[in-house]
Structures are given as C-alpha cells and as structure tokens.
Amino acid sequence: MATALTRAQQAWQLLEHLSDPEIPVITLRELGILRDVREGAEALEVVITPTYSGCPAMGQIEDDVRATLASAGLQARVVTQLAPAWTTDWMSDAAREKLRAYGIAPPHACASEPAGSASVVQFAARSATTEEVHCPQCGSANTTETSHFGSTACKALYRCLDCMEPFDYFKPY
Ligand SMILES: [Zn+2]
C-alpha cells in the first residue's frame, strides 16, 4: 500500500513547477519566493515572500498558487511574509544558470549586508566603480548600463559593448 501524501506534501508537488509570471523559465521555488506550505487551522497556508515590496507580480503569483491548488481540489490561503526580506542570495545556483540561459544576467551575491549608513556609503562607492556585469550572450564584461529600470523594476537594462546585444540584469538586493 502506497503511503498517502499529506495535503501539504501534495501542495508542494503541485507548486514545485509553478513558474514566475515574469521569468517563465524559472520556478517560484528556485527564485526563493515560495517559502513554505503548512497546515493552517482551516486550510493549507502557502507562504510567499515578494522579491521586493510592492512587486506588481505578487498578485499574479497569489492567483497562480490558488488556481494550481484548486485544480487538485486543495483549498489554500496565501500568506505573504515580509520578514526576513527576500534577497537575491535565496536564488539557487540552478536558477542563476537558467536566468543566464534565458538571456538575463544573474545577480551578484552582495545582498546580505546589514542596513546602515556605513554600508550605504560602501554600496554607493562600489556600484559606481567596480560592479561588473557579464553579458549572458558572449560572457564579455565590457558592458554598460543603459537604464536602471529594465522591463520590470527588478531588472536593469544593459548593453554589451562587444556583441552589442541589449540584456536584462537582475539587480541584487
Ligand atoms: Zn556580449
């Protein structure tokens, strides 16, 4: 006799392949947005953390989560958890690789700095001088930022000066 899955395990299996509405090649779990599935008092609770506060995709993500579970007869409540805040460090290596293959330069791991005046100064100095973003097409570091806000607020628009291809850079934070 096969062991029956709990509702929460079933929900994990269903949500495992749910992709990000803005980056269809990557799943919510790989991005680190999908945090937890747990038994609530009345229904399942799915815990998600937005990539940044006010991310316009979150409404879409909540709808997708509910619709995916409802199609399997599972009722769930989506809980948005803001603390600890999402950082690009939560993105798996596999997710970074998929981003690159999709044509988006993955974020540098420099997000987990404590907030404070010292680190703000340090961040400003560093981003002005040493941030090196590699072209996802040809790997060249000879790139330039053309717009700080790309197709979405999470990304900046870059152009490669070697192959001349424009590309999105997923900004670290
Ligand atoms: Zn290039």
Image (spheres, helix red, strand yellow):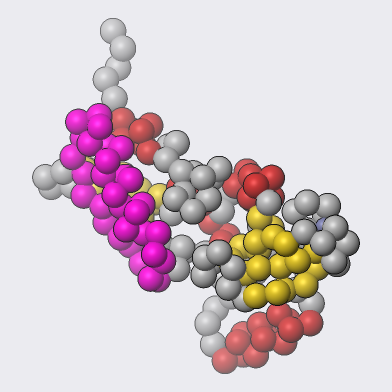
Q: Residue 119 appears at what percent x and percent y?
A: 62, 85
Q: Image quadrant for the C terminus? A: bottom right
Q: Residue at x 33, y 45 (%)?
A: 64
Tell me if residue 11 can be seen.
yes
Depicted 155 relative to depicted 104: above or below: below
Q: Could you tell whether 167 is left or right of 149 in the image?
A: right
Q: Residue 43 appears at what percent x and percent y?
A: 16, 43
Q: Residue 66 appears at what percent x and percent y?
A: 26, 44
Residue 81 placement: quadrant: bottom left
Q: Indicate the quadrant of ligand 1 in the picture.
A: bottom right
Depicted 4 relative to depicted 94: above or below: above
Q: Which residue is situated farthest in the left direction here?
A: 42
Q: Which residue is situated farthest in the right direction here?
A: 162
Q: Residue 130 appears at what percent x and percent y?
A: 79, 77
Q: Image quadrant for the N terminus? A: top left
Region of the chain picked out in magenta, as a range: 53-82
Q: Which residue is situated farthest in the top direction here?
A: 1
Q: Nearer the viewer, residue 93 or 67?
A: 67
Q: Residue at x 27, y 37 (%)?
A: 69
Q: Residue at x 88, y 62 (%)?
A: 162
Q: How many marks?
A: 0
Depicted 85 relative to depicted 63: above or below: below
* Residue 170 colored in magenta in the image: no
Tell me if residue 85 can be seen.
no
Q: Nearer the viewer, residue 131 or 137?
A: 137
Q: Could you tell whether 38 is left or right of 98 in the image?
A: left
* Residue 62 colored in magenta in the image: yes
Q: Nearer the viewer, residue 164 or 22?
A: 164
Depicted 16 relative to depicted 139: above or below: above
Q: Residue at x 80, y 68 (%)?
A: 143
Q: Could you tell whether 78 is left or right of 172 in the image?
A: left
